[in-house]
């Protein structure tokens, strides 16, 4: 593992250290005469930090994105969230109105990464999670995805139900639906370990109804997600789960990767 420490640079607050772990990386290209087009890594940023405005990432003093992105969005375009950077160990900064965090990050040549900026409702808890997108092409009827819970202070899971029924013709008609249940997991801030978020879930391509539920079996209908074949996704919860409350703002979000 490579341990990277990020410090909070906001004025008027005590410096804090944040750590994140990346998967073991090797074979970084340091030869400046190498083919510059071959020495690239691909990085996406998703903004789920409730207490700050729009964000960008700077690597060795250069902005990764052409513009800062607002809360609840991901960089790039639908199906193509990544921007390119040079594969190396870089000085990385999370930038809002000021530099919010700074530290080192390592990106391997030709690899893909998802960076999540998140907090627990205020800027003092700002942190980042860097995940390597080691994707495998799924079967032609399935998609792969990882699941993350960015609802602060909660423990939540999701249920996905494929919307097309299959009928088995027997003495009676039996209706079958493909259902995926993901057990409740804590807010990412309680467990910011990258190895806890692999692509270990699959769902049926097409339209899937989505329900969130807590460890007391309270359910909330979050609408539906549309999945395309042979793709992989980041799927995450954003907002607050308060059954029976007018402040319930929970949403399901998805980011289609390469």
Image: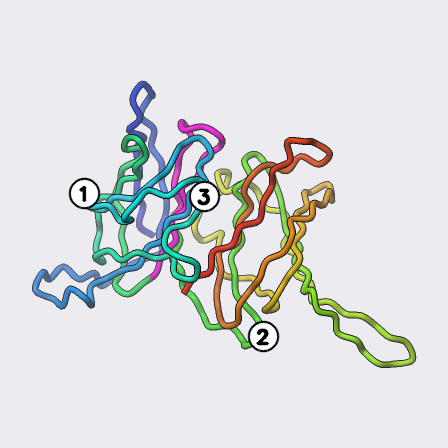
Of residues 236 and 184, the one nearer the viewer is 236
Quadrant (top left, top right, bottom left, bottom right) of the C terminus: bottom left
Q: Is residue 75 left or right of residue 25?
A: right
- In the rendered image, the residue lying farthest to the right is 171
The residue range painted magenta reads: 112-129
Q: Is residue 84 above or below residue 54?
A: below
Nearer-N-terminus badge (1/3): 1
What number is the disc on residue 141? Answer: 2
Q: Are marks 2 and 3 in contact (CB under 8 Å)?
A: no
Q: Please tell me in which quadrant of the rendered image residue 159 appears.
A: bottom right
Which element type, helix, strand or loop, lies under badge 2? loop
**Separation of marks 1 and 3 at Cα, in angstroms:** 26 Å
Nearer-N-terminus badge (1/2): 1
- What residue do we see at 36% from left, 55% from top? 76
Q: Please tell me in which quadrant of the rendered image residue 127 appears.
A: top left
> For mark 3, does the 10 Å Cα neighbourhood hold few (<14), some (14 to 19), or many (20 or more) residues?
some
Q: Please tell me in which quadrant of the rendered image residue 53 appears.
A: top left
**Where does the image place residue 245, in percent across and percent down from the top left?**
70, 31
Q: Which residue is mark 3?
A: 192
**Separation of marks 2 and 3 at Cα, in angstroms:** 31 Å
Q: Is residue 232 above or below residue 56?
A: below
Residue 115 lies in the magenta-colored region: yes
**Where does the image place residue 230, in percent across and percent down from the top left?**
49, 72
Residue 122 lies in the magenta-colored region: yes
**Where does the image place residue 217, in percent across and percent down from the top left?**
74, 44
Q: Which residue is mark 1?
A: 61
Q: Nearer the observer, disc 1 or disc 3?
A: 1
Q: Is residue 139 left or right of residue 19?
A: right
Q: Is residue 63 above or below residue 230?
A: above
Nearer-N-terminus badge (2/3): 2
**Where does the image place residue 67, in percent across and percent down from the top left?**
30, 45
- What residue do we see at 70% from left, 69% from top? 164
């Amino acid at each position: 593992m490579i341990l990277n420490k990020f410090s909070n640079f906001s004025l008027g607050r005590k410096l804090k250290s944040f750590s994140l772990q990346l998967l073991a990386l090797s074979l970084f290209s340091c030869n400046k005469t190498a083919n510059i087009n071959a020495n690239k890594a691909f990085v996406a940023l998703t903004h789920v930090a409730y207490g700050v405005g729009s964000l960008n990432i700077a690597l060795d003093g250069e902005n990764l994105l052409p513009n800062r992105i607002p809360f609840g969005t991901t960089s790039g375009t639908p199906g193509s969230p990544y921007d390119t950077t040079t594969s190396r160990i870089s000085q990385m900064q999370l930038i809002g109105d000021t530099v919010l965090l700074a530290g080192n990050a390592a990106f391997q040549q030709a690899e893909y990464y998802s960076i999540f900026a998140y907090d627990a409702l205020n800027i003092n808890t700002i942190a980042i999670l860097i995940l390597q997108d080691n994707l495998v092409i799924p079967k032609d009827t399935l998609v792969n995805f990882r699941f993350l819970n960015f609802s602060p202070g909660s423990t939540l899971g999701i249920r996905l139900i494929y919307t097309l029924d299959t009928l088995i013709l027997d003495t009676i008609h039996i209706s079958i639906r493909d259902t995926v249940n993901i057990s409740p997991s804590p807010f990412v801030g309680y467990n910011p370990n990258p190895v806890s978020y692999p692509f270990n879930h699959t769902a049926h391509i097409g339209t899937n109804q989505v329900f969130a539920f807590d460890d007391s079996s309270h359910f909330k209908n979050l609408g539906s997600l549309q999945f395309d074949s042979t793709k992989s996704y980041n799927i995450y919860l954003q907002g607050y789960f308060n059954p029976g409350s007018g402040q319930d703002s929970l949403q399901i979000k998805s980011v289609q990767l390469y």
